């Protein structure tokens, strides 16, 4: 198994844990304020990402992949334009994904519903990739890396239809768990589009930069994490700064350890996916990461059973690994075993359609 595939699988598992943690924390720690959660994730993710990048550079020097830290600094400087600028854009797009992601949770989106829509990313990546690859023939040679010798096949169209039916069916089957997409449809769509775009930007940038230097993946990482800090603009407005100060005094400072845990895991989602995109096609990476929906479903099921037990014991809150779990924020169990079976069938149907679209 290649290091790129291993990193992508690890990114998928990290995403599953991140979605569960964020679902619990946005409503409790951040009181449903999406921009506050976004700001913290942007700043913490950027900081942790830069630190982990430096650690990676040191390890690369120690194992002999790079001659010295000065050498990698020189490479980074030499490919700053245009590749560094494009990677900066990828970082901005990445953190933009989280803005819409947090807005969805602020509308009480169900964790498994969110995971299911994240799993649909390969469809969007495939469609956008096809459009951009056509542009390569119109005088955009930078996009040639996205071109494929294979044409569009009928199984792709069938896969899109199957995945859509699965996702819509799952959404309808979870209405009792506040899974109504209508409330946050705009942010959901923007999340899917930006989530697809940033992977494509990273892949095409690294593919082209690798023709200039073999160390492009390592050299361009700082630009990505600098772009990730774009969420700082959340506090440009004075009202948002005041809200953050009040929220920090009343809530955030009591959740420091859970927040650090959540942000480290969130950073690893993007860090590991970045390495996957250094060698694997964006549609394939999106497919592997999309498989996290099954893990989220199982974790959500566990939390639903835990919530049911809390309600039976008239227990309002519970601490698990330092994270406060509120009974009111716990997901609900399916109405019956039949409903649960239908949810599982729709998830499997969605995954089957995504695989049909994404595999070549």
Image (cartoon, grey):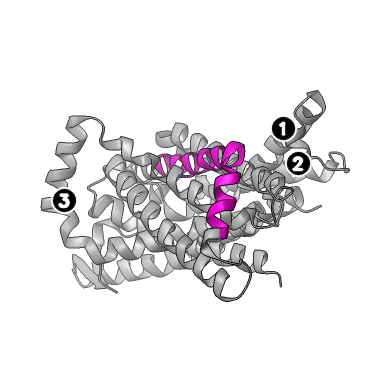
Residue 17, horizontal then vertical, whole percent: 44, 64
Examine the rendered structure and indicate whether residue 324 appears above or below residue 170. Answer: below
Mark 1 to mark 2 CA distance (whole Å): 7 Å
Q: Is residue 124 left or right of residue 359?
A: left
Mark 2: which secondary structure?
Answer: helix
Q: Position of residue 157 (x, y in %)?
A: 77, 40
* Mark 3 surroundings within 10 Å by alpha-carbon count, few (fewer than 14), some (14 through 19), many (20 or more): some
Residue at the location (51% across, 53% down)?
Answer: 115
Say if the magenta span includes residue 76: yes
For the residues labelled 1 and 3, the Cα–Cα distance comes to: 43 Å
Q: Is residue 131 left or right of residue 217?
A: right
Quarter of the rendering containing residue 130: top right
Q: Residue at x 14, y 37 (%)?
A: 242
What number is the disc on residue 146? 2
Q: Earlier in the sequence, mark 3 or mark 2?
A: 2
Residue labelled with disc 1: 132
Q: Are marks 3 and 2 in contact (CB under 8 Å)?
A: no
Q: Position of residue 75 (x, y in %)?
A: 59, 52
- Among numbered discs 1 and 2, the one appearing first in the sequence: 1
- Figure check: 36 above or below 327: above
Q: Are marks 1 and 3 in contact (CB under 8 Å)?
A: no
From this view, report whether residue 18 is shown above or below residue 153: below
Q: Residue at x 75, y 41 (%)?
A: 146
Mark number displayed over residue 248: 3
Q: Are marks 1 and 2 in contact (CB under 8 Å)?
A: yes
- Is residue 130 shown in magenta? no
Q: Residues within 10 Å of mark 2 (few under 14, many from 20)?
A: many
Q: Nearer the viewer, residue 273 or 68?
A: 68
Q: Is residue 68 above or below residue 168?
A: below
- Per the rendered image, the range of residues in magenta is 71-100
For image coordinates 73% across by 36% down, the residue present is: 143
Q: Is residue 225 left or right of residue 255?
A: right
């Amino acid at each position: 198994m290649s290091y790129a595939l291993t990193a992508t699988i690890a990114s998928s598992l990290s995403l599953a844990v991140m979605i569960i943690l964020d679902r619990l924390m946005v409503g409790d720690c951040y009181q449903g304020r999406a921009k506050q959660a976004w700001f913290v994730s942007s700043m913490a993710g950027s900081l942790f990402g830069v630190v982990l990048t430096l650690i990676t550079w040191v390890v690369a020097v120690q194992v002999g992949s790079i001659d010295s830290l000065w050498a990698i600094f020189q490479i980074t400087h030499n490919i700053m334009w245009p590749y560094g600028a494009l990677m900066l854009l990828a970082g901005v797009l990445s953190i933009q994904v989280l803005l819409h992601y947090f807005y969805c949770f602020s509308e009480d989106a169900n964790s498994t519903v969110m995971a299911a829509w994240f799993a649909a990313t390969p469809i969007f990546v495939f469609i956008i990739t096809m459009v951009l690859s056509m542009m390569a023939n119109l005088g955009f040679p930078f996009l040639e890396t996205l071109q494929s010798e294979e044409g569009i096949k009928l199984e792709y169209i069938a896969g899109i239809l199957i995945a859509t039916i699965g996702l819509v069916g799952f959404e309808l089957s979870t209405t009792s768990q506040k899974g109504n997409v209508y409330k946050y449809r705009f942010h959901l769509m923007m999340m899917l589009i930006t989530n697809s775009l940033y992977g494509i930007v990273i892949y095409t940038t690294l593919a082209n930069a690798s023709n200039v230097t073999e160390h492009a993946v390592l050299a361009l990482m700082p630009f990505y994490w600098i772009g990730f800090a774009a969420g700082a603009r959340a506090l440009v407005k004075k009202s948002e700064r005041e809200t953050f100060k009040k929220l920090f005094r009343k809530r955030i400072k009591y959740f420091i350890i859970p927040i650090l845990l959540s942000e480290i895991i969130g950073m690893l989602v993007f860090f590991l996916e970045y390495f996957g995109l250094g060698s694997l096609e964006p549609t394939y990476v999106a497919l592997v990461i999309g498989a996290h929906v099954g893990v989220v479903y199982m974790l959500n099921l566990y939390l639903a059973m835990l919530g049911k037990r809390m309600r039976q014991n008239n227990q309002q809150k519970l601490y698990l690994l330092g994270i406060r779990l509120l009974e009111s924020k716990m997901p609900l169990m399916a109405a019956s075993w039949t409903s649960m079976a239908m949810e599982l069938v729709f998830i499997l149907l969605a995954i089957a359609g995504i695989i049909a679209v994404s595999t070549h």
